Amino acid sequence: MARNIGPKCRQCRREGEKLFLKGDKCFSDKCPIERRNYPPGQHGQRRTRLSDYATQLREKQKIRRIYGLLENQFRNVYKQADRQKGVTGENLLQLLEGRLDNVTYSMGFGSSRAEARQIIRHNCILLNGKKANIPSQLVKPGDQVEVAEHAKNYLRIKSSIEVAKRRTIPAWLEVDFEDLKGLYKNNPDRSDLSSTINESLVVELYSK
């Protein structure tokens, strides 16, 4: 299975903002973007003016990296969003937010989306009481996500929970940190999601 194994922090520096790909490190002083807030490479500190196409491409790459998808995976999600009724950009973000790996991360059961994918693959997550080991599986409103009984004492999950208790849980989720379970109450509205994401640029890019 193809996967991105390159340095995570270089991806954040390339996009010029924190993408929160490294868990606890992103919230500490060790985060490289705090010290070197410019693109990696020998030409990273040069000031360049981006074309419209380059601006659209960078936004697409940023969103793709935030959610940890490869190019073909991201394009397939976009096609699915385009087929649905409503605004394509908002549909795209809702589909990305509704992935099981993202919901697991947002509920605090993984310190990053990459770690959430790993614990899902290791059969540590249940969806509506049944084993779910496909990270891309879509979670629907009313679905319950929980940590499997055999995984509740795993150190990485315990440490992720402690970090999650100090951050804000999204309004469309409800989490019980005692029983390690959560409820996906509804699909998020656009106003609930990050204002630093401009999904309309992705729609413009793929509409060419």
Image (spheres, rainbow, N blue to C red):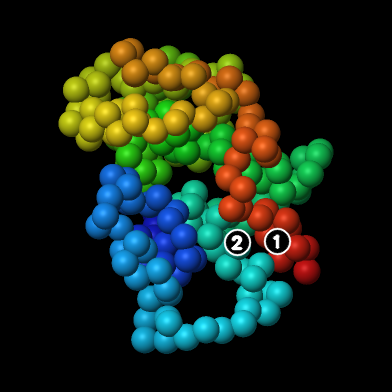
Q: How many marks?
A: 2
Q: Secondary structure at mark 2?
A: helix
**Residue that appears at 45% across and 69% down:** 14
Q: Around disc 2, counting alpha carbons within 10 Å, would you say few (fewer than 14), some (14 to 19), or many (20 or more)? A: many
Residue 194 seen in render: yes
Q: Which mark is residue 60?
A: 2
Q: Quadrant of the N terminus?
A: bottom left
Above or below for 42 versus 152 = below
Q: Secondary structure at mark 1?
A: helix
**Residue that appears at 70% across and 61% down:** 201
Among numbered discs 1 and 2, the one appearing first in the sequence: 2
**Residue that appears at 34% across and 22% down:** 147
Residue 6 seen in render: no
Q: Foreground: 70 or 180? A: 180
**Residue that appears at 32% across and 47% down:** 27
Q: Foreground: 4 or 123? A: 4
The kind of residue tagged 2 is Lys
Above or below for 44 versus 119 = below
Q: Quadrant of residue 42?
A: bottom left
Q: Which mark is residue 39?
A: none
Q: Quadrant of residue 39?
A: bottom left
The kind of residue tagged 1 is Leu
Q: Which residue is mark 1?
A: 201
Do tag 1 and tag 2 residues touch (Cβ < 8 Å)? yes
